[in-house]
C-alpha cells in the first residue's frame, strides 16, 4: 500500500519545502563544499514528547519537526573513499532552517519519516 495520497493532503499538513544537501571533499589544501538545493513536499508536524525521546540528549532541548515525504532525506554519509562526505540535509521551511538527525526509511510504502532539529543560524559561523 502506498500512502502518496495522504502525503499530498493539505488537511494533513502537506507543504513544500527546500532541501539543501552539502557535499564536502577533503584534500591537502583543505575542505571544499558544494551544495545542491531541491524542492520537495510532504507533511510536516511539530515534534511531540515521544519524538524527543528518539533524539540524543544534547538535542532534546531543541525544537524539532517530523517530516513525512517521498523525497529521500539523509542524515549524511561518510563517503566511500574517505576523502568526501555528505553533511546532514538541511530543510528550509516556514522561514527557518532544520537539520535532519534521524531518518526512518519506509520506501517500500513510498515515503520516509525524518526528524529534524532547528538550526540557530544567528549563532552559526
Image (cartoon, grey):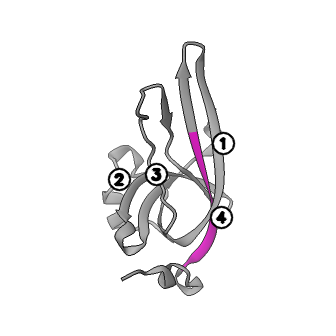
The percent coordinates of residue 36 (x first, y second) are: 64, 47
Counting residues from the N terminus, which is met first, the one under dot 3 or under dot 1?
3
Magenta segment: does it hold 16? Answer: yes
Magenta segment: does it hold 78? Answer: no
Badge 1, how many Cα within 10 Å: few under 14, some, many 20+? few
Task: Tell me the quarter of the image containing the N terminus.
Answer: bottom left
The percent coordinates of residue 37 (x first, y second) are: 66, 51
Asked if residue 105 lies left or right of residue 21, the reply is left
The mark closer to the camera, 1 or 2, is: 2
Element carrying mark 2: loop
Task: Tell me the quarter of the image containing the C terminus.
Answer: top right
- Give me the C-alpha separation between circle 3 and circle 1: 24 Å
Counting residues from the N terminus, which is met first, the one under dot 4 or under dot 3?
3
The mark closer to the camera, 1 or 4, is: 4
Counting residues from the N terminus, which is met first, the one under dot 2 or under dot 3?
2
- Give me the C-alpha separation between circle 2 and circle 3: 16 Å
Task: Please state the extent of the stretch shown in magenta in the rendering.
Answer: 13-22
Q: At 41% across and 80% down in the image, what residue appears? A: 2
Badge 2, how many Cα within 10 Å: few under 14, some, many 20+? some
Counting residues from the N terminus, which is met first, the one under dot 1 or under dot 2?
2
Q: Which mark is residue 89?
A: none
The mark closer to the camera, 3 or 1, is: 3
Element carrying mark 3: loop
Could you tell me what secondary structure mostly forms the magenta stretch?
strand
Residue that carries the numbered disc 3 in the rendered image: 74
Q: Are marks 2 and 4 in contact (CB under 8 Å)?
A: no
Residue that carries the numbered disc 1 in the rendered image: 122
Counting residues from the N terminus, which is met first, the one under dot 2 or under dot 4?
2
Amino acid at each position: 500500500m502506498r500512502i502518496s495520497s495522504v502525503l499530498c493532503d493539505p488537511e494533513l499538513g502537506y507543504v513544500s519545502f527546500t532541501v539543501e544537501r552539502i557535499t564536502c571533499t577533503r584534500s591537502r589544501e583543505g575542505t571544499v563544499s558544494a551544495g545542491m538545493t531541491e524542492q520537495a513536499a510532504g507533511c510536516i508536524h511539530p515534534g511531540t514528547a515521544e519524538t524527543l525521546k528518539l533524539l540524543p540528549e544534547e538535542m532534546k532541548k531543541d525544537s524539532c519537526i517530523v517530516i513525512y515525504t517521498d523525497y529521500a532525506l539523509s542524515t549524511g554519509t561518510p563517503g566511500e573513499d574517505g576523502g568526501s562526505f555528505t553533511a546532514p540535509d538541511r530543510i528550509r521551511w516556514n522561514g527557518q532552517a532544520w537539520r535532519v538527525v534521524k531518518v526512518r526509511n519506509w520506501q517500500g510504502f513510498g515515503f520516509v519519516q525524518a526528524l529534524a532539529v532547528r538550526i540557530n543560524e544567528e549563532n552559526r559561523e
